[in-house]
Amino acid sequence: MSLKVCKFGGSSLADAEQFLKVRSIIESDPERRIVVVSAPGKRFPEDVKITDLLLLCQSMHEQNLDIAPVFQKIRTRYKEIVQNLKIDIDIDKLLDETEDAMRRNGTRDFMASRGEYLCGRIVATWLGAKFVEPGEFLQIESNGLIKEENYDKLGSELRDEKLVVMPGFYGRTPKGKIKTFARGGSDISGAVAARAVHADLYENWTDVNGFLMADPRLVKNPKHIENLTYKELRELAYMGANVLHDESIYPVSEPGIPIEIRNTNDPGGAFTRIVASRPKDDRIVTGIAGRKDFYLVQIEKMLMNRMVGFGRRLLQIFETHGVNFEHAPTGIDTMSVIVRKEYIGDQLPSILDEIKRTLQPDRLEVTDNLALIATVGQGMIRCVGFAGRLCTALSRRGINLQVIDLGSTQDNMIVGVELNDFEEAVRAIYEEFEQN
Ligand code: ASP
């Protein structure tokens, strides 16, 4: 019998009604033996996720304010689920202990992790499953990665005769403290669990039927994507296709465990399957994704091409500020650096100061209205004139290109446009390549 790890996201566990769907999905397939859960998410658009309430508790705790009023909201949500489903668990005791532990251990990661912890305890009791505590068995290094040798320890805990439930989103540091992944990180926990038990499949259950060729808020009825490669997925997810955390790929890509993105509200419906390689097909473009939040820092200096180490010194300034850069297009006497606004935070003035002081550029300019659009597809490399078609599609709509970067493997072309042109540019590219 093959072994499937299923991860259920916050929308799949938002209330008792969703819990019932999760149960019937698990029980309909005996191969679904390891279940990874998120914390309850939003029940309706204006609702607040449990994790956000917990983070609010944490900031109150930091300011020496009482967390009780906010924790009361968390309490109500879990109690409603337990009472509606008549789950045989002493929920008051569990919540009291958790609130107490949060007052004692007020770190951000500990508090944020309690949503998944509580949800895992409730689901495990409800399904009569074994509960595996990631705070004991899932070791996360300071760079957020898992060491090869630590998969085995988690794997032997997860492999069991019984159904197993593990909370997502957190693990422990090498020193034993609770540590969370980035937001949305239960997807990564599911992938880590799949790798640890050498699963045949990692099912990621969410509230959509997988990936679409473009964001449906920008493009009307975009095509559904049936198959994606890990690489295509990583590029699309990194560039804003918000279905799966982009770092969920690294644990499963090496052993080649496929991922399926499925819809808890439509279990028999369409889904996207993500694999190491897919058969060559006629598709040129697999998907289009974009983000709006970038700075473009442009530097000009006469005879830059003769100055050995100029590029390194420029990038080092970003590095010493702890800022990742996305792209660094160069000309003869020009170099630009594209960075995400969220990575720079409030450090822009000090970065610019240092550039002026150490590199004395002839011109230094910052554009803060840059959006990047990635057009991704393994078929692009075989398509003569691909870049021409894309640029023509944009120029026909009067959209000016600020940056062009055809990735070195030529399966991802990134263009930068002004913020105001973003939506129109995505639509133009989609329409050009919808039929391939
Ligand atoms: N609950 C966490 C979040 O909201 C992690 C997750 O759901 O994946 O970010």
Image (cartoon, rainbow, N blue to C red):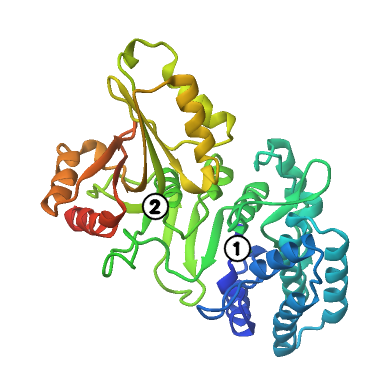
Q: Is residue 272 above or below residue 70?
A: above
Q: Quadrant of residue 387?
A: top left
Q: Horizontally, is 428 left or right of 361 in the view?
A: left
Q: Is residue 89 above or below residue 182?
A: below
Residue annotated with mark 2 = 291
Residue 89 vs residue 276, the one in the foreground? 89
- Which x, y percent locates residue 286? 31, 51
- The residue shown at (80%, 68%) is 65
Q: Horizontally, is 285 left or right of 60 in the view?
A: left
What amino acid type is highlighted by mark number 2? Arg
What amino acid type is highlighted by mark number 1? Lys
* SS at circle 2: strand
- The residue shown at (50%, 78%) is 45
Q: Horizontally, is 232 left or right of 151 in the view?
A: left
Q: Nearer the viewer, mark 2 or mark 1?
A: 2
Q: Does residue 103 show up?
A: yes
Quarter, ligand 1: bottom right
Gap in Å between the C-alphas at discs 2 and 1?
A: 26 Å
Q: Is mark 1 within 8 Å of ligand 1?
A: no
Q: Does residue 159 show up?
A: no
Q: Is mark 2 within 8 Å of ligand 1?
A: no
Q: Quadrant of residue 305?
A: top left
| Label 2, residues with CA under 10 Å away: few <14, some 14-19, many ≥20 | some
- Which x, y percent locates residue 23? 63, 77
Q: Horizontally, is 41 left or right of 233 in the view?
A: right
Residue annotated with mark 1 = 7
Numbered tag placed on residue 434 in the rendering: none
